[in-house]
Image (cartoon, coloured by chain):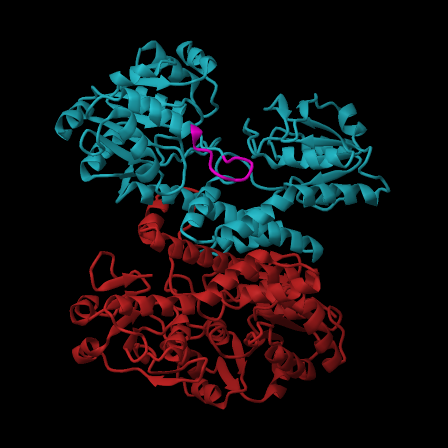
Chain colours: A red, B cyan
Amino acid sequence: MNSRSLLGKIKNKEVTIGIVGLGYVGLPLAVTFASTGIDVIGFEKSEVKVEKVNNCQNYIADVDENELQKCVSSGMLSATLDFTNIKKCDAIIICVPTPLDKFKKPNMEFIEDSCRSVGQNIKVDSFICLESTTYPTTTEDFILPILEKESGLKGESDFWLAFSPERVDPGNIEFKTRNTPKVMGAMSLEGQEIGIALYSLAISEVYPVSSPRVAEMVKILENTYRLVNISLINELALLSHRMHINIWEVIDAAATKPYGFQPFYPGPGIGGHCIPLDPFYLEHIAKGFNFDLTMISTAGQIDNLMPSRMMVRINFALNKQKKALNGSKILFLGVAYKSDIADERESPALKIMDEVIRKGGIVSYHDPYISSIKTQKDHSLDSVILTDAVLVNADCIVITTKHSSFNYENILLQAKLIVDLRNAYNFKNDKIFKL
Amino acid sequence: MNSRSLLGKIKNKEVTIGIVGLGYVGLPLAVTFASTGIDVIGFEKSEVKVEKVNNCQNYIADVDENELQKCVSSGMLSATLDFTNIKKCDAIIICVPTPLDKFKKPNMEFIEDSCRSVGQNIKVDSFICLESTTYPTTTEDFILPILEKESGLKGESDFWLAFSPERVDPGNIEFKTRNTPKVMGAMSLEGQEIGIALYSLAISEVYPVSSPRVAEMVKILENTYRLVNISLINELALLSHRMHINIWEVIDAAATKPYGFQPFYPGPGIGGHCIPLDPFYLEHIAKGFNFDLTMISTAGQIDNLMPSRMMVRINFALNKQKKALNGSKILFLGVAYKSDIADERESPALKIMDEVIRKGGIVSYHDPYISSIKTQKDHSLDSVILTDAVLVNADCIVITTKHSSFNYENILLQAKLIVDLRNAYNFKNDKIFKL
């Protein structure tokens, strides 16, 4: 095996890149490569997504529709259901989800399926890189054996293998795929050289580390840091509430410290596809090393309790007005897991809704970005149109997402009662109950 | 009571400020005020400190000796043991320590004593401000009653009371008392106006908050954030060690993320007068509100276990060379709780020494800044002179503080075995065992 040939192709932009999985991570990456004139083939199991891409229809908010159109119409980007086309690719990047099952164990089936398909179809001298967040050791101990078995080839002799964590932050306007530094750990120095050359075609800074497991740990550390700090501030918010201390005022004041502090803000719980999941991959593998990660499990416990605590907060806000939760009309404003995005994955709003329904609350919601939802307990709801009548009619309005498009002044004017879980109202008012 | 008179004195720099406690916080603050031409009287119980100040002898590393000399010789700063001189002061700032007792309960005796002395001697229309870190509600529920009882005066009628947390970071070259923003919460709007005017005489930015308890919580949040993140990274370091992952490499790579991450580095445990203490004031008061702070207690547990874990690490490093800890000569390099400072308060090095001594290790240490120590278990040691013979003679050298003055190259050359708890050696070597 000789890396010179592949490096030459990369240098001359004659490389063909296969991207497996065209979701939040894969589609932006595919467009980022294709728009620099690299030939990209996207592999998907979803017929709908393949058709959309090939018809220049964007479905990921962070992707620029015009850029997608240019890539497809210029022939630089196409999508396919047919994994035998992997044969045409010199480099394959896997961007499939790694969910947790309901016992918080990593569900590896998407990674496993992708690796089988890739293994069955790769040609000699390919470079393969995983971007899916997963527990450290996955690339070396889980993926490599599958690829070798399916292909009959030998890693670092017949193909190169690496891991490079995605750092997609949905809704981030400043940092996109192109200008977010990319960490990468390969299994050999040759693989590292290829990986750096490949990603540098499209990404401004590639930061190599010594092994895939280090790169895997990097991503987990980034999001464990966030889980732990959000859980800490949520716990301190609950105490501060009892002590008549406004935690948001505390945080803003602490943020005046010019070193050694980074502010996190409380809310009804963590959401999205990263922070609620990534730390628990590590917890899973740690158990295999007879190690309990007490900070992660404590943070997880705090977060697990947030939905029922928020339901109790709603209950006692109503109680002040001598109303029971059972039979009251509760209107949730915002179900996205953070402001101004159309993503309700793992959103705490849905969990609070389930808790409120369980206690007899009559639940409705409005979200300008999300027209219908299904909760964990399989309640299906459609977003209501936000009229004054809808606002007036609710016994309690719960601010679960601070979308900037909401007319907070009018909401307050019409509301009987507001439970503000996002500090949308930065002042005191008899109608408003805070987290 | 009329605040105009005091505000006028402040404006005209005719105010006399009393500073109670001339330690790490009080002396820099006294010098900062006095050097701008404000009359400052320092109150101390230590005769030694009073004499030193009055003889222009500096004893706090962060204070500039020349500046101290100028303040004292110009008559702007004097120190006294006589608390009846409080009568001469228009404003009194209390900067005494708040230790924890050995059951991790706040020891309020220094604050209590100071407040008694202040209360017995204040004149009408004084402004009193506490800077000592303590649990939220201290100013309102603990200090105010003492001041009122001892003085026979009424808070916010006869005197003003406020809390403003110190933010001293020993050894910080960039941020000193003068240019670190100062949070302050007073008990009335008049008190707030006075506090802002007073501190603005010497400090570049004063950030008012709505109450003393908010200001008290600010300081606790800042240091709880640090405790939790250091404990998290220490726990992840222990796991990474088992998984053959270099945690320092992981952290440096994660730090390339341009948003949402702040790096913390592992070590043998937390030290100093803030991070090991402040969060536990909050834990203490939280129990009074029937609230358990699970993140703080988990972080505390990790930190409590670090010294014995580090002793075990030393033990098994020796074990690789077929030596028992019992009877081995262990040389500790650095006992300060962080690099390049002369402060061993709560330093993990001392706790590890106790653990090693308990198992029969023969302990010595060298620290260029600290000539003698006494451990928690009352072992007294003097710093040895760091000759090659001393290095060669040790069965194990433990790097507990990464002082920049150490000759790491020569230490490695002479050493039989090194346990590097601070990543002083950023490479692999058979002699070196890492945290």
Tell me residue A299's x, y (percent). Answer: 51, 60
Q: Nearer the viewer, residue A164 or A243?
A: A243
- Residue B35 in sight from this viewpoint: no
A382 lies above or below B160: below
Q: Nearer the viewer, residue B65 or A35?
A: B65
For the record, the magenta segment spans B100-109
A127 lies above or below A247: below
Q: Is B346 placed left or right of B192 in the picture? A: right
Q: Nearer the viewer, residue B96 or B255?
A: B96
- Find residue B291 and report its image quarter: bottom left
Q: Nearer the viewer, residue A201 or A106?
A: A106
B176 lies above or below B47: below
From the image, which quarter does the N terminus of chain A lie in? bottom right
Task: Please check the rendered image and state whether residue B58 is part of the magenta-colored stretch, yes or no.
Answer: no
Q: Is A302 placed left or right of A103 in the picture? A: left
Task: Please check the rendered image and state whether residue B107 is part of the magenta-colored stretch, yes or no.
Answer: yes
Q: How many marks?
A: 0
From the image, which quarter does the C terminus of chain A lie in? bottom left
Task: Determine the residue positioned at 66% across, 69% down.
Answer: A138
Task: Determine the residue positioned at 45% across, 42% down.
Answer: B281
Tell me residue A380's x, y (percent). Answer: 38, 86
Magenta highlight: main SS: loop
Q: Is A64 placed left or right of B252 in the picture? A: left
Task: Determine the residue positioned at 47% across, 52% down.
Answer: B293
Tell me residue A242's x, y (percent). Answer: 35, 54
